[in-house]
Image (tube, helix red, strand yellow):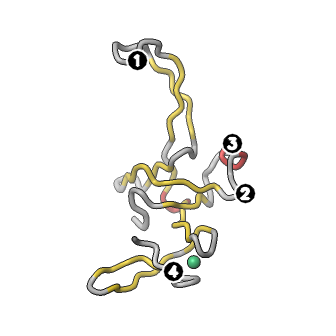
Amino acid sequence: MHVKKGDIVEVIAGAREKDYKNAKDGKVTGKVLKVLPAQNRVVVEGVNLRKKHMKPTTTIQQGGIIEIEGSIHASNVLIYCPKCGKGVRTGSAMVGDKKVRVCKKCGETLDK
Ligand SMILES: [Zn+2]
């Protein structure tokens, strides 16, 4: 997986029309909430929201419809480079003895 939990990514495909309405500069970006390596899919905060009907339970008294993020294929997201202002391909570099991901375009380190 080229992304991990907590990464900010740009969704380059697979987002819904609604996601683009909320998008800034036509770019759908969000934080990776969950990585599903077995399916090669990720869940991105606020992207690909799906309505889910909930039955009333003891903890959720009312039940009703809630919106949860659906997963999208990992190949449809790119790590967002703040310097480039968009999703980019990444390479790796060594900082000390630590391997970090860097933007292939501008060289910005994308791991904190
Ligand atoms: Zn960059």
Mark found first going from the N terminus, 1 or 2:
2
Q: Is label 4's Cβ within 8 Å of ligand 1?
A: yes
The crowd level at tag 2 (other Cα within 10 Å; few <14, some 14-19, many 20+) is few
Instruction: State the residue at coordinates (26%, 85%).
Output: 97
Mark found first going from the N terminus, 3 or 4:
3
Q: Which residue is mark 2?
A: 26
Is 103 left or right of 96, judged from the image as shown?
right
Residue 111 locus on image (x, y percent): 41, 72
Q: Are marks 3 and 4 in contact (CB under 8 Å)?
A: no
Residue 53 locus on image (x, y percent): 50, 21
Disc on res. 18: 3
Q: Which residue is mark 4?
A: 108
Tell me the kind of residue under disc 2. Gly
Tell me the kind of residue under disc 4. Glu
Tell me the kind of residue under disc 1. Ile
Q: CA distance from mark 4 to mark 1?
A: 45 Å
Mark found first going from the N terminus, 4 or 1:
1
Q: Are marks 2 and 4 in contact (CB under 8 Å)?
A: no
The crowd level at tag 3 (other Cα within 10 Å; few <14, some 14-19, many 20+) is few
Among the 4 quarters of the image, the one containing residue 24: bottom right
Among the 4 quarters of the image, the one containing residue 5: bottom left
For mark 1, give the secondary structure. loop
For mark 2, give the secondary structure. loop
Mark found first going from the N terminus, 2 or 4:
2
Mark found first going from the N terminus, 1 or 3:
3
Instruction: State the residue at coordinates (63%, 55%).
Output: 28
From the image, state whether disc 2 or disc 4 is nearer to you. Answer: 4
Instruction: State the residue at coordinates (50%, 50%).
Output: 44
